[in-house]
Image: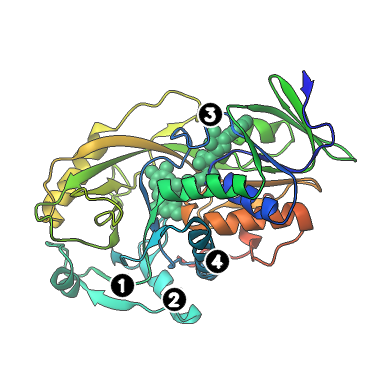
Amino acid sequence: MTQSNPAGYDLIVIGAGPVGLATAWHAARRGHPVLVLEQFDPLTERGSSGGAERQWRLQYAQEDLTRLAVAARPLWRELEAAGERRLIHETGSLWFGDTQQATNEGQIAGAAAVLDRVGVRYEWLTAKEIEHRFPFTGLPAAYEGFYQPDGGMIDVRATRWVLFEQAQRAGAVINAPSRVHEVLPDDAGVTVRTADASYRAEKVVIAAGGFADPLLERLGITLDVELLEMTTCSFRLRDPGADLPTWFAFERATDEDTNLFYGFGRNPWSAEDLVRAGPDFEDRTLTSLHEPGHGPDQRHLRRIAGWVTEHLPLLEPTPVRPATCRIALPRDPARQFYLGPAGDRIVVQSAGWGFKYVPLFGRACAELALDSTTSFDLGRMALTGTPTTKAEG
Ligand SMILES: Cc1cc2nc3c(=O)[nH]c(=O)nc-3n(C[C@H](O)[C@H](O)[C@H](O)COP(=O)(O)OP(=O)(O)OC[C@H]3O[C@@H](n4cnc5c(N)ncnc54)[C@H](O)[C@@H]3O)c2cc1C
């Protein structure tokens, strides 16, 4: 076993997903020697960050999460300026359906109340107004919702590439493929072991996404998460000149599934006339993200195709490019994410619909590791205990 860098690093980051790279970028920019260890290749699609786009939104039924999304905005701008690329496209965010329906993604009425309190603009719309303004049809008359114009979509691949480039430019060393088997904290620092090397650092950030469990178990930490394989697909626009905002339909659960659907507009960074849409059904669990996937769920594809046929005539109803993506979600929807210190030398971020917070989570992880404090309110995400602020929806 080699003893790499005997002088040791100030920080070792486990995982070169977007959160790990953002952490490395923030720490290395402050002049700290940083090592990132990634088990696959740094731009792998095998974690939770595959695919082209993610929804960017400010609305949450929990006020602290909306405030964090607002606080993430200037950090995204900073990353865009460093990479000289636009990463967030404000194409608008439309939420509609049963305004009282509480889901893992939030709740319309609660989120609108939070937007009021925080002072974020939005327009409240009836089903008729939604159908008049946007290409939806056949919505139940009782449906209502809101349009938030600052929401939109995140260019995932550009974000990952910019973070990869900027972390290295700031001086972070990225070793891949290099799978970490063990993290051993002691009074003087932390030893991090891979199959063929051993490294020392003052502090460690575990940004291993849904793969975090085996590393954490050895540290005596258990996160109450569910590992899910989600089915996604795209649809062809019938009118290549038309477009729509990102959207989420909050409907009453059926006996079979959550009955939730979401979708995107055209990717502003691509010339394709395809838009992505999918069911938000959390019923395909995995025991480990290393487990081979089951592939796209045919029933889920039929459900989203049925919803599109009924409500989105702008799209050809045949799903194209069916795919899957893996995610770890906290079982407690009030929690939404895990982020916090585990002892004096280790910081953990794992789980949740977290792409929108990538630069903020990266900064928070770097601050917690290097300064032992952060100004961001991450109380609900603490590794132990139950969230202090309950979900309002
Ligand atoms: C279908 C789907 C849709 C989503 N939609 C949205 C959305 O609209 N909006 C939103 O904000 N979020 C969304 N998310 C969530 C978002 O994509 C994730 O929160 C985010 O991509 C996670 O990034 P990460 O860096 O934490 O994890 P990952 O990208 O999974 O990175 C973790 C990395 O750690 C590495 N690693 C793990 N263990 C080890 C080890 N032992 N040694 C070395 N390396 C290791 C892994 O290989 C991986 O590269 C969605 C997720 C999915 C799956």
Q: Which residue is mark 3?
A: 40
| 308 on left or right of 183 | left
Q: Residues within 10 Å of mark 1 (few under 14, many from 20)?
A: many
The label shown at residue 146 is 1
Quadrant placement of the N terminus: top right
Q: Which residue is mark 2?
A: 115
- Is residue 99 visible in this depiction of the protein? yes
Check if mark 3's residue and mark 2's residue have beta carbons within 8 Å. Answer: no
Which mark sits nearer the N-terminus, 4 or 2?
A: 4
Rendered view: 198 above or below 375: above
Residue 27 location in percent, x, y?
A: 69, 52
Q: Residues within 10 Å of mark 4 (few under 14, many from 20)?
A: some
Q: Which residue is mark 4?
A: 68
Residue at position x 64%, y 50% from top? 170
Q: Is mark 3 within 8 Å of ligand 1?
A: yes
Q: Which quadrant of the figure has residue 387?
A: bottom right
Rendered view: 21 above or below 80: above
Give whichever of 228, 273 is nearer the camera: 273
* CA gap, disc 3 and disc 1: 40 Å
Q: Report the amino acid beneath label 3.
A: Phe
Q: Residues within 10 Å of mark 2 (few under 14, many from 20)?
A: many
* CA gap, disc 3 and disc 2: 40 Å
* CA gap, disc 1 and disc 4: 20 Å
- Is residue 335 visible in this depiction of the protein? no
Rendered view: 305 above or below 152: above
Which mark sits nearer the N-terminus, 3 or 2?
A: 3
* CA gap, disc 4 and disc 2: 12 Å
The label nearer to you, 3 versus 2, is: 3
Which mark sits nearer the N-terminus, 1 or 4?
A: 4
> How are the residues colored?
rainbow
